[in-house]
Image (cartoon, grey):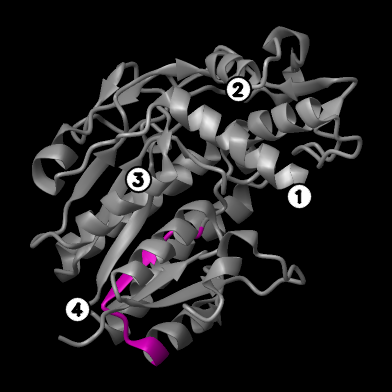
Amino acid sequence: MSTKTAIITGVSGQDASYLADLLVEKGYKVVGTLRRTSESERANIKHLKGKIVIEYADLIDSSSLDNVIQKHQPDEVYNLAAQSVPADSWTHPIYTGEVTALGVVRLLESIRRFVPACKFYQGSSREIFGGVHQEVMDEQTPFLANNPYGIAKLYAHLMMRNYRESFGMFTCAGILFNHESPRRGLHFVSRKITTAVACIKLGITDPPLDESGQSLVRDGKVHMGNLDAMRDWGYAKEYVDAMWRIMQQEKPDDYIIATNTLHSIKEFCQIAFAHVGLNWEEHVFSDDAFKRPTEITASRGDFGKAKRELGWEPKVSFEELAKLMVDADLERLRK
């Protein structure tokens, strides 16, 4: 059997880098796309140098997508590129729409025209449900996106379905609830917490900057938003296995990938700081400047369909996740 070729967009991101690891292990030829920037340090994929092919393409630029699709004639395309920060979507709503919404249509059009038999995976998000007042969500839950990021993701999700229904293409999606790891960007709350824990514990005098451009730790405290916000948190490395399984099905479909548990940001802080012997209340400040204009409802995802049809279920617990992220940040900063 010939080697499968998979294209992963945004390959330096958390999910995409773990997926690249998985597909390389499975013997795929992996092509990862990146936006061309002046940044050369791609920490999440440094270990993959020589193991994957890097191409420069941008979801805003149709011709760059056409070039990559035509050149590599992929069997599978995983779209994991996006403006992926819900908080940033309020200050960058047009850019978020161009990349996270319309970018998906540009990519689907390239596939439809040049490799229509190719399978396509769309990285959907729990944010498409937005403010639905329902604690447990499944694939039948109505969509009620309530921030620019969620609305862009919903547009992309519906267009993905439209290409499946209108053109008979194999297009599918994983509707992922929050998923974290040591490869998560610093602008996400989980890594913000664990990096701050490591900085405070190790006495780092020049911590990295937070999303406001200020020092992550100021006067021994990390500034956070709504500490009572609740999330269903899982481990990203496990979630990419679900992505691959979704793409191996005989017929395309959409699946919720989650843990069906609910924990607050405050709980994450408690576990992370306690793991290094610190009292979180002495080091965390709830700052109105970091609160969202609207907050998604507290909800957890029912992964029952994924368990039945894909044989997938989460294994790493919320507490284990927080601790392994703290340990990784301690090791990184010690170096």
Q: Is residue 179 left or right of residue 75?
A: right
* Residue 134 point in image, percent of width and height: 30, 17
Residue at 56% x, 49% y is 183
Please state which of the two labelled residues, at mark 4 or mark 3, is closer to the viewer.
3
Residue at 9% over, 39% down: 308
Q: Nearer the viewer, mark 1 or mark 3?
A: 1
Q: Quadrant location of residue 215?
A: top right
Q: Earlier in the sequence, mark 4 or mark 3?
A: 4
Disc 2 packing (10 Å; few <14; some 14–19; many ≥20) = many
In this orientation, which residue lies closer to the viewer: 103 or 174? 174
List the residue tagged with mark 2.
272
Callout 3, which amino acid?
Glu
* Mark 3–mark 2 distance (CA, rounded to whole Å): 21 Å
Q: Is tag 4's residue or tag 1's residue first in the polypeptide sequence? A: 4
Q: Which residue is mark 3?
A: 238
Residue drawn at 74 percent across, 17 percent down: 288
Tag in front: 2 or 4 = 2
Circle nearer the N terminus (1, 3): 3
Toward which corner of the image does residue 12 lie, by quadrant? Answer: bottom right
Residue 36 on image: x %, y %: 66, 74
Gap in angstroms between the C-alphas marked 4 and 3: 27 Å
Query: Which residue, given by chain and number where applicable, does mark 4 sit on?
Result: 117
Residue 85 is covered by the magenta coloring: no
| Amino acid residing under circle 4 | Ala
Question: In the rendered structure, which segment of residues is drawn in magenta?
Answer: 71-81
